[in-house]
Amino acid sequence: MYERLLVAVDGSTVAESILPYALGISRATGSQLTLLRVVDGDGERAEASRYVDALAAELKVESRCISADRDVASAILDEAARVPGTLVAMTSQGRSGVLGAVLGSVAMNVLRGSRGPILVYRPHERPAGDRGVPVKVERIVIPVDTTPGDESIGAQAAEMARWLGAQLVVISVLGSRARPAAGTPSGDLIESSYVHSRAVALGKEYGVEVSWEVLHGDEPEKAIADFVGNDRGAILAMVTRANAAPVRAALLGSVTTGCLRKAGVPILMRLP
């Protein structure tokens, strides 16, 4: 599926917190893992190179250090494009000025400029110093509903599950307001039928083990976050909602970004 994982690091332990997932994916699939350190100018390059080279040597992976002339997102995208089949992986928070806030400008611009999904992680707790211990990904969790476009990441989620030998878990969130008219099937029955059929179809098409679940709650991001429950072996796969302009406003107001804040697991994220 991917030939290379490109992990953006900036010298902070927060940015390094995605490394256990990247290591686990790389070792499970045999894909190359490259650590990328982007600097604003050549004046910082020597120190930055020493940092990323030492980290890469510790993890036994490849390192790259490049200058960005203050456009970090473009530098990441250019490096990703240099090697076909590259998946960009990064945290949503890093050192100030590099990866930004909840979904900072760099992560947002990488997502917006990428032709496919990127893997984004926002750790809930202070990193525990286990950056060299791989995480085995066992579940790819994809929330779906009946809105056109929300399922567009289904193929990538199923392909990733097959690539990793993981289970694909299809879920949907049913709010309390979703009450059927008298004489019609209950919302649970309708939603269960839809989620079940979606899971079965993906399982057959991609040859992966599947399961499905209908969750309940009027706050989808909370229901989804409670379901994954900081499971170190889970990755969410989600499309950001782009039904409002500008893109930044739609992105920051989306269920996807709510899950990024609350779920504590990486999200394979893309725009529709």
Image (spheres, rainbow, N blue to C red):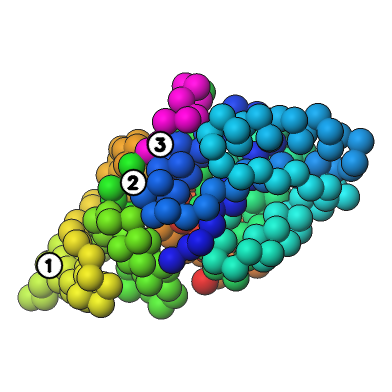
In the picture, the disc for residue 174 is: none
Instruction: State whether residue 106 is above or below residue 81.
Output: above
Picture layout, residue 15 above or below residue 212: above
The mark closer to the camera, 2 or 3, is 3
Determine which quarter of the picture holds residue 142: bottom left
Q: CA distance from mark 3 to mark 1?
A: 39 Å
Badge 3 or badge 1: first in the primary sequence: 3
Looking at the rendered structure, the secondary structure element under dot 2 is loop
Amino acid carrying mark 3 in the image: Pro
Query: In the image, what residue occupies the spot 45% across and 36% down?
Result: 20
Determine whether label 3 and label 1 are within 8 Å by CB.
no
Q: CA distance from mark 2 to mark 3?
A: 9 Å
Specify whether 84 is left or right of 53: left
**In this figure, which residue is indicated by the disc labeled 1?**
189
Give me the residue at 70% from left, 46% from top: 64
Which residue was labeled with disc 2?
137
* Residue type (three-letter) at the residue carrying disc 2: Val
Tell me which label, 2 or 1, sits earlier in the chain.
2
Q: Closest to the observer: 110 or 263?
A: 110
Depth check: give the residue in front, 148 or 174. Answer: 148
State the image quarter where residue 35 is shown. Answer: top right
Q: Which residue appears farthest toward the right when viewing the image?
A: 43
Query: What's under tag 1, amino acid-wise?
Result: Leu
Of circles 2 and 1, which is in front? Answer: 2
- Residue 64: say if magenta: no
- Residue 134's label in the rendered image is 3
Under circle 1, the secondary element is: helix
The magenta segment: 127-135
